Image: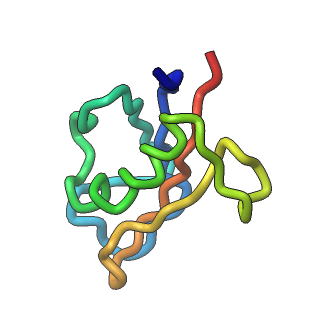
Amino acid sequence: MAKRYDVMVRVVSQNGNCGAGHKVGDEWLIKGKTPEGMCLSAFNALYPSARVLMLGGTFPWEAASDVTTVACPDAANPVVFEVKRLRQ
């Protein structure tokens, strides 16, 4: 069975008025469940990337193989999340 990693999600940019109230610096730890307090639409957008990192995958187009960024689907009030694999 593949090793599983925890993933940290952090808000790195927020423009406009986020309906969920997310702001720069907010963080959540993903350990296999939807993090409490995270907008479900944002979680739905970033979960595929988080899953790749949780299972040891990488994004070859990123500068760091353990990190990627994902924007929430609200184009009028974008929140950008950094999704980072935590090494144990």
Residue 16 placed where, x, y %?
37, 76
Residue 81 placed where, x, y %?
48, 55
Residue beneath the point at 67% across and 42% down:
66
Quadrant location of residue 18? bottom left
Residue lying furthest right: 63
| Scheme by which the image is coloured | rainbow
Out of 70 and 57, give the one closest to the viewer: 57
Q: In this view, does 26 lie above or below 87?
A: below
Left or right: residue 6 compared with residue 44? right
Residue lying furthest top: 88
Number of numbered discs: 0
Residue 37 placed where, x, y %?
22, 40
Left or right: residue 74 compared with residue 1? left
Left or right: residue 88 compared with residue 46? right
Residue beneath the point at 62% across and 15% down:
88
Residue 29 placed where, x, y %?
41, 30
Residue beneath the point at 30% across and 76% down:
74
Residue beneath the point at 20% across and 54% down:
40
Out of 81 and 7, give the one closest to the viewer: 7
Left or right: residue 33 compared with residue 56? left
Residue lying furthest front: 1
Residue lying furthest bottom: 76
Out of 88 and 71, give the one closest to the viewer: 88
